[in-house]
Image: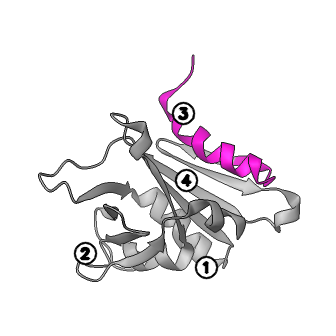
Amino acid sequence: MIRKSDFYYGSLLSVLINKQKEPFLIASEGERRIYLLGKNNNGSKVFVKYVSKPTKRKNDIKTTWNFNFGKKEIAEIKKMRELNENTQFALICADSDNWNDSEIAILGLSDILKCLDIDYDRENFRVAIQLKKRSRNFEVYGTGVSSDRPVLIKKDYISMLSDI
């Protein structure tokens, strides 16, 4: 039986394998996985989450995907920060109603830390990935960053993955 999550993670794995990155699954729980990239990549990690549909809004100029982070994930991210690990975050922004509108946003550890504000104790942590029509960048915000002043991330995930 093929799980729904395998389709989402498969999109990223295909790109990593084609770039000869040799991903090894080291953690999996719910809607997130962590991969260690091959020996030649100095132990860099990719923390992967997916959302299967964007948040529907009346405004068709932009599309927004919301990623929720639980307390266990926040603890993992804090540990990554403490160990100064080379970690990228691949947020798979799927649209199961129209697969051609799906995207992958790649954020660095500093970007995810800024958007989540993990040092402020709260029940829920969230990162939103917003894409405006014809834009070359994602606008990323969350519990730590207002949508008025988002972090801009290049939409070209293929080149972003080359840096991993």
Amino acid tagged 4: Val
Residue 147 circle label: 2
Which residue is denoted by mark 3 in the rendering? 7
Q: Are marks 2 and 4 in contact (CB under 8 Å)?
A: no
Q: Is residue 15 above or below residue 130?
A: above
Q: Residue beneath label 1, please?
A: 82
Pinpoint residue 153: horizontal percent, then vertical percent: 46, 73
Q: Are marks 2 and 1 in contact (CB under 8 Å)?
A: no
User: Label for residue 40?
Assistant: none
Check disc 3 and report its element: helix, strand or loop. Answer: helix
Q: Which residues are magenta?
A: 1-25
Crowdedness of circle 2 by 10 Å Cα count: few (<14), some, many (20+)? some
Q: Earlier in the sequence, mark 2 or mark 4?
A: 4
Element assignment for label 1: helix
Residue 48, numbered label:
4
Q: Earlier in the sequence, mark 3 or mark 2?
A: 3
Q: Amino acid at mark 2?
A: Ser
Instruction: Please name the amino acid that badge 1 sits on.
Output: Glu
Spatial CA span between label 4 and label 3 = 13 Å
SS for dot 2: loop
Residue at image x 46%, y 52%?
A: 103
Query: Cα distance, mark 3 to mark 1?
Result: 32 Å
Residue lying at the far left of the rendered structure: 58
